[in-house]
Image: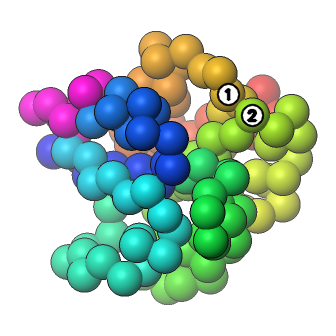
Amino acid sequence: MKHIIFVEDDESIRDIASIIFNNNKYRVTIFSRGEELFEAETVSAPDIFILDKQLPGMDGLDICRKLKAQEDTRHVPVVMLSANPKIKTLAREAGADESIEKPFSIDNLKDLINNLTDGEKMSLTA
């Protein structure tokens, strides 16, 4: 079972993530603030991080930079979510592996997560 850590301040998106990713293939741990991620006592790194860019407190891009700077999480794919039309560039600069502009299709998100957790890395420029 693949483990997803999802950081999103929008309750409706958190609810959707819980519904679509808590199943026999995935389990999802959801946080509403970036600080919660670093305060949590997780046993091991997840298979993927999904981060909203615009979060209260610590920004998603800063979280990404911190995760990519740490030895135990730098190898874990990071997907950035944002309504910002420049998210692909911002995500790439922060070290993210992928990004999705809001609003997004649930199927596109699921496909992206499946590809990244199954080892098929996609390009930010695609």
- Left/right placement of residue 92 relative to residue 45 reads right
* Start-end of magenta stretch: 19-26
- Which residue lies under the disc numbered 2? 83
Q: Which residue is mark 1?
A: 102
Which residue lies at the image location 46% right of the left edge and 14% below the top edge? 107
Query: Is 24 within the magenta?
Result: yes
Q: Which element carries disc 2, helix, strand or loop?
A: loop
The percent coordinates of residue 41 (x first, y second) are 25, 81
User: How is colour applied across the structure in the image?
Assistant: rainbow
Would residue 63 be seen by someone viewing this image from the given angle? Answer: yes
- Dot 1 falls on a residue whose secondary structure is loop
Q: Is residue 49 above or below residue 16?
A: below
- Where the C terminus falls, by quadrant? top right
Q: Residue at x 44, y 56 (%)?
A: 32
Q: Are marks 1 and 2 in contact (CB under 8 Å)?
A: yes
Which residue corresponds to the image point at 29% horizontal and 25% vertical from the top-left? 20
